[in-house]
Amino acid sequence: MKKATIALLALAALVWSLSGCSSTPTAKSGDTVKVHYTGKMDNDSVFDSSQGREPLQFVIGAGQMLAGFDQGVVGMKVGEKKTIILTPEQAYGQPSDERIVRVGKGQFPPDLQLTVGMQLQGPTGFPVTVKEIGADSVTIDANHPLAGKTLTFEVELMEITPPADSSGQ
């Protein structure tokens, strides 16, 4: 009788875990999560990292992160590590000639010493890069600096907080 009881308990645990009723929560849309990450380009150079800082906090599906990064965290458990690779289309898109524009020098503060390669904050808050300085105009590139790049993120999920109105299921 004891063996039958143990077998039934094992079967119940298996059915429980396969039905998604596991006691270990996984990250899902609407959850607030905290992650540590390191972002690298194809040549393994690091362009950003949370190491040495507080983990990055965001709400999955709220549009706070690149969509591919957001979706890459879905299904992760606390303590799990994962590599998320984003193509340019999943990240910042391909560079566009339409985002390279010439503006009059009068659009810049007169005391600003412009140099080629200088990064400035554009009117939308995104960085723009000075590409060329002419006598009366400045050519700026408003493409994101990571446009056209495949990005690799090493991610570790540190915390999951379900939405306040969530029943926890």
Image (spheres, helix red, strand yellow):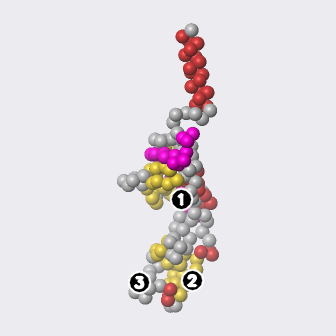
Residue 43 x %, y %: 50, 57
How far apart are the alpha carbons under marks 2 and 1?
30 Å
- What residue would you read off at disc 2? 102
Q: Secondary structure at mark 1?
A: loop
Seen at 52% across and 90% down, the residue is: 136
Q: Amino acid at mark 1?
A: Gln
The verdict on residue 167 being magenta is: yes
Query: Residues in magenta?
Result: 148-169
Q: Nearer the viewer, mark 2 or mark 1?
A: 1
Seen at 57% across and 83% down, the residue is: 102
54 with respect to 143 (left or right): left
- Residue 64's mark? 1
Q: Secondary structure at mark 2?
A: strand
Around disc 3, counting alpha carbons within 10 Å, would you say few (fewer than 14), some (14 to 19), or many (20 or more)?
A: few
Q: Amino acid at mark 3?
A: Gln
Residue 129 x %, y %: 50, 75
Find residue 16 and report its image quarter.
Answer: top right
92 with respect to 115 (left or right): right
Q: Nearer the viewer, residue 104 or 43?
A: 104
Q: Amino acid at mark 2?
A: Arg
- Residue 155's mark? none
Seen at 48% across and 74% down, the residue is: 121
Q: Secondary structure at mark 3?
A: loop
Query: Is mark 3 in CB contact (under 8 Å) with mark 1?
Result: no
How far apart are the alpha carbons under marks 3 and 2?
17 Å
Task: For residue 44, say whether it is visible.
Answer: no
- What residue would you read off at disc 3? 113
- Quadrant housing the C terminus: top right
Around disc 2, counting alpha carbons within 10 Å, would you say few (fewer than 14), some (14 to 19), or many (20 or more)?
A: some
Q: Which badge, 3 or 2, comes first in the chain's sequence?
A: 2
Q: Nearer the viewer, residue 2 or 135?
A: 2
